[in-house]
Image (cartoon, rainbow, N blue to C red):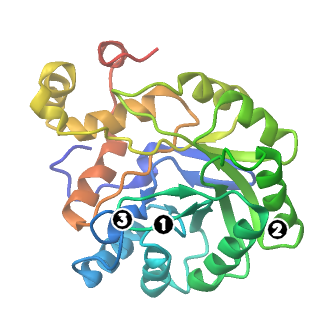
Amino acid sequence: MTKGSQHPSAAAAGTVLLGDMVVHRLGYGAMRITGKGVWGEPDDPEEAKRVLRRAIDLGVDLIDTADSYGPRISERLIAEALHPYPEDLVVATKGGYTRPGPGDWEPDGRPEHLRRACEGSLQRLRLDRIDLYQLHTPDDDVPYAESVGALKELQFEGKIRWIGVSNVSLDQLETARGLVEVVSVQNRFNLKDRRHEKVLDRCAELGIGFIPWFPLGAGNLAEGGGAPAEIAEAHGATAAQIALAWLLARSPVMLPIPGTSRVEHLEQNVAAAGIELAEEEVRRLGGR
């Protein structure tokens, strides 16, 4: 399925297991339905809600957000657009950052902050329990085990179903695994930035879902020419779709969550689930 398809479906990407939850391996990241700098209201709130509803129509069954997106605005829009939620929808959110202003992100991994963050997310999302709650980032001023331990307490209280971690090293992942069952890791990973390849491989070994943030990298892949553009032309696709198809081919635990604020762009992203790259094409792009 390529950019010309009228009926893309996230189901074409196959599935991955997050704890006991089976989700399609192409989700939606809801960071970009906020204002510039991931701050404030979006320019067109109704279009943001249309994007969310269309994602569900296209078979997306995991939506990723965070209390820091907006802040708080992304979660609120998700609830306004989709509540009551489809039975099979996993709304994943995160806590661990504060937002002093547009483009500014400050870690806060204190247990008391994480409790407030989680309980605020529950209210905004209109949920009694969050299916997947991820620790957004390590905080150098707080022992990592204390931050993870706060989520363990919230899980024991029934406010969190499954726990994930984000922006972690191998050592931090193992620290978290020593305290809780980690079902997902959300680290930056894309065609041009593979610094967390060892973390990805460890997730594959353990059967932990790997959610690459910034999955399309920093720019217009097509403008750079080379293999992504050439392979895209051969498939009648965009270079961005090829970048997503490569991620899906890279590992069976990969779960990309490309974000957008436009329905047309969403449909193109989801259509990437149906692109099957040949082994030689994966090798040209740098796959294993």
Residue 144 location, x and y as percent? 76, 45
Q: What SS does tag 2 mark?
A: helix
Q: Image check: 168 left or right of 56? A: right
Q: Mark on residue 154?
A: 2
Which one is nearer the viewer's eye here, 271 or 162? Answer: 162
The mark nearer the N terminus, 1 or 3, is: 3
The mark nearer the N terminus, 2 or 1, is: 1
Q: How far apart are marks 2 and 3 (CA)?
A: 27 Å
Amino acid type, residue under disc 3 in the picture: Val
Q: Image check: 176 left or right of 60? A: right
Q: Mark 3 points at which residue?
A: 38
Residue 171 lies in quadrant:
top right
Residue 157 location, x and y as percent? 88, 73
Note whether 71 is above or below 217 in the view shown.
below
Amino acid type, residue under disc 2 in the picture: Leu
Looking at the image, which residue is at 35% across and 57% down? 259
Note whether 253 is above or below 73 in the view shown.
above
Q: Name the residue under label 1.
A: 99
Q: How crowded is mark 1: few (under 14 residues within 10 Å), some or many (20 or more)?
A: some
Which one is nearer the viewer's eye here, 24 or 215? Answer: 215
Q: What SS does tag 3 mark?
A: loop
